[in-house]
Image (tube, grey):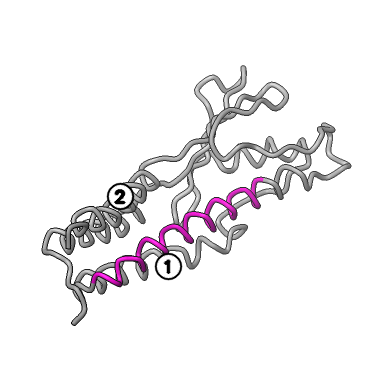
């Protein structure tokens, strides 16, 4: 008979699924731009399903350096990412309900693969927007790649890239998916 996980492990997985589902409602990543003329800063805020912030102003400024404008339509991932997130939460709930110890690797593996693919995708988009600059732009800049996290200086702008609430919820969910391995270690 397959080894069953404890109620504590099952509750930990339910908690992980709840946090993953809740993360849909919060921003996952952001970038804040500061310059002498924008002392309060301009924001790009990325949710799993949409962009928010000062998108029009940032696009207007990016025009001068030849960067392509971006919008919700620029990122097809925003159309299907909420469904993938809900699917992941559902898989974790199923694993919790089945209570089979061997299935504990499934949510951990999916979260690791999803995290790696997510970071790769972010890097890919940052590289695309920062290196595919129009050579006929009014201001000529060398291609650049903003960091996923940290500070970048470009002309008179200082940008800060950061993970935010939704990403922290995902991190906590990952810890809750690992917790059953510790809870079940003696069995």
CA separation in Å, label 2 and label 1? 19 Å
Q: Determine the image quadrant of residue 49.
A: bottom left
Give me the residue at 63% from left, 50% from top.
70
Seen at 43% across and 47% down, the residue is 28
Label ID, residue 175: 2
Residue shown at the point (79%, 44%) measured from the top left: 133
- Tag nearer the camera, 2 or 1: 2
- Local packing at callout 1 (Cα closer than 10 Å; few below 14, some 14-19, many 20+) is few
Q: Give the x, y percent position of residue 180.
A: 23, 58
Relative depth, front residue between 63 and 159: 159
Label of residue 84 in the image: 1
Magenta region's main secondary structure?
helix
Closest to the observer, 80 or 70: 80
Residue 173 magenta-drawn? no
How far from the left and from the top, in percent, is residue 73? 59, 60
Q: In which quadrant will I find the C terminus?
A: bottom left
Residue 58's tag is none
Splitting the image into 4 quarters, where does residue 101 fall?
bottom left
**Percent of width and height locating residue 12:** 20, 57
Q: Nearer the viewer, residue 96 or 151?
A: 96
Please tell me whether mark 1 sits on a helix, a strand or a loop. helix
> Residue 77: which quarter of the image?
bottom right
Q: For the magenta stretch, what is the residue range?
A: 101-126
Across and down, in percent, residue 1 comes to 18, 82
Nearest the eye: 63 or 84: 84
Left or right of residue 138: residue 166: left
């Amino acid at each position: 008979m397959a080894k069953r996980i404890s109620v504590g492990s099952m509750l930990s997985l339910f908690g992980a699924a709840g946090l993953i589902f809740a993360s849909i409602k919060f921003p996952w990543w952001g970038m804040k731009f500061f310059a002498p003329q924008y002392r309060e800063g301009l924001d790009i805020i990325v949710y799993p399903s949409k962009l928010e912030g000062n998108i029009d102003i940032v696009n207007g400024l990016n025009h001068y350096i030849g960067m392509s404008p971006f919008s919700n339509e620029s990122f097809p991932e925003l159309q299907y990412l909420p469904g993938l997130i809900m699917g992941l939460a559902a898989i974790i709930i199923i694993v919790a309900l089945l209570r089979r110890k061997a299935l504990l690797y499934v949510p951990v593996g999916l979260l690791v693969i999803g995290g790696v693919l997510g970071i790769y995708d972010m890097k890919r988009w940052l590289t695309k927007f920062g290196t595919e600059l129009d050579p006929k732009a009014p201001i000529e800049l060398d291609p650049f790649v903003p960091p996923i996290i940290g500070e970048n200086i470009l002309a008179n702008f200082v940008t800060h890239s950061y993970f935010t609430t939704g990403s922290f919820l995902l991190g906590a969910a990952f810890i809750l998916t690992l917790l059953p391995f510790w809870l079940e270690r003696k069995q």
